[in-house]
Every structure is written in C-alpha cells, then in structure tokens.
Amino acid sequence: MTDVASAPDLRAGLEAILLVVDEPVTEMALAQVLERPVHEIAGALRELSAEYTGEGRGFDLREVAGGWRFYTRAECAALVERFVRDGQQARLTQAALETLAVVAYRQPVSRARVAAIRGVNSDGVMRTLVARGLVEEAGTDPESQALLYRTSSYFLERMGLRDLDELPELAPFLPDVENLEEQK
C-alpha cells in the first residue's frame, strides 16, 4: 500500500509513469498502479493533455491504441528528426552491437526474447537501434501480442549485405560444447 504522506500527487505520478512507457498504457493499468479510481485517472489524463496542448509544449499526451503515451508534437518533428539523424554518426556501444546481432540472427524477435538471450533488459538499446533506423517493427507475435523486430534495409546497406543470407555463420564463433563438458 502506498504511504499517502510521501506519495506524489496524481498528475506527477501519471507523468512519471508515462515518461518510461514504450507502448500506450491503459487507464485501468494506471489506476491500479496509482491506486486511484479509473474515472479520476481518465480526467487527470485529459487535463494534462489539454494543458500541454494549451501551453504549446514540445510534446503531446495522446490517447491511442487503447492507452495513453507521450509523443513529440508535430511542429517539432523536423528538429527531432535532425537530432536523431545527426546522432547516427556515433559508434554503437557493445550492448547495441550485441542486441543488433540477436535481432539479425533471430528475427523477427521480441524485446523480451532479446533480453532473455542477452541476460539484461535491452529496451533502451532497442529504442536506440530503432531511432537509428537499423531495426524496425515487424508485426506482433500471435501468441503474446508482443511487438516483433527485424533488421531494416538500412542495416543491410550499412553492413554491405545484399540480404540476410550473407550474414556469416555463427557456428565457428560458438564454443565447442563437447570439449567444455569434457574439461569439467
């Protein structure tokens, strides 16, 4: 149960949660986390959305796909695009390279599967790879409804590949499991 004296107000709580979501979050989910009635959550979300629009903020709070999420305001799209595109010159981190390899060899793959293979949360890295255009959405998993990702044509271009069949075989880079077992 939340300590009422130390709990942030409803609007601050909503903003904090909405800043970290990757997909639209439902009013019901927000109500459960914030321990408030759904109608109160719905009203606060609509007020925040109207406030951001009225103040001409660089972001927008929108209700889409059955939930709520922050988006860049349309008037700022060119600036954001330039920022993201300019950032593409930076080298990829080790985490980004690992994540990109998992996507390339296991596509289409969900974020959860990437995280399971790598052993760490890869959400931020996946967002970076999507923003850089190396990875793109590839539909949803029919069982879990999770978003699936694949490498993009830009990935192939940057890697100098005609298609994914030109990716090198992984077997030569994997440890010899039989020899590892014998060494134990």
Image (cartoon, helix red, strand yellow):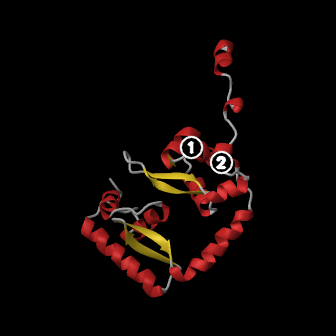
The numbered mark, 1 or 2, whose residue comes first in the sequence reads 2
Residue 6 image position (x, y, % from top left): 40, 61
Question: Quadrant of the image for the C terminus?
Answer: top right
Residue 175 image position (x, y, % from top left): 68, 26
Residue 120 image position (x, y, % from top left): 56, 43
Instruction: Identify the residue at image location x=41%, y=65%.
Output: 13
Q: How many residues crowd around disc 1 within 10 Å: few (fewer than 14), some, or many (20 or more)?
A: few
- Could you say which disc has been placed on residue 148 in the image? none
Disc 1 to disc 2, C-alpha distance: 10 Å
Instruction: Identify the residue at image location x=72%, y=52%.
Output: 159
Q: Amino acid type of disc 2?
A: Ala
Confirm or deny contact between disc 1 and disc 2 (CB under 8 A): yes
Q: Amino acid type of disc 1?
A: Val
Total marks in image = 2
The one nearer the camera, 29 or 33, is 29
The correct choice, above or below, for 90 with respect to 146 in the image is below
Query: Quarter of the image holding residue 2?
Result: bottom left
Q: Secondary structure at mark 1?
A: loop
- Could you say which disc has been placed on residue 120 in the image? 1
The one nearer the camera, 100 or 10, is 100
Q: Would residue 159 be found to the left or right of residue 150 on screen?
A: right
Residue 127 image position (x, y, % from top left): 57, 58
Query: Quarter of the image holding residue 166?
Result: top right
The one nearer the camera, 167 or 41, is 167
The correct choice, above or below, for 34 with respect to 94 in the image is below
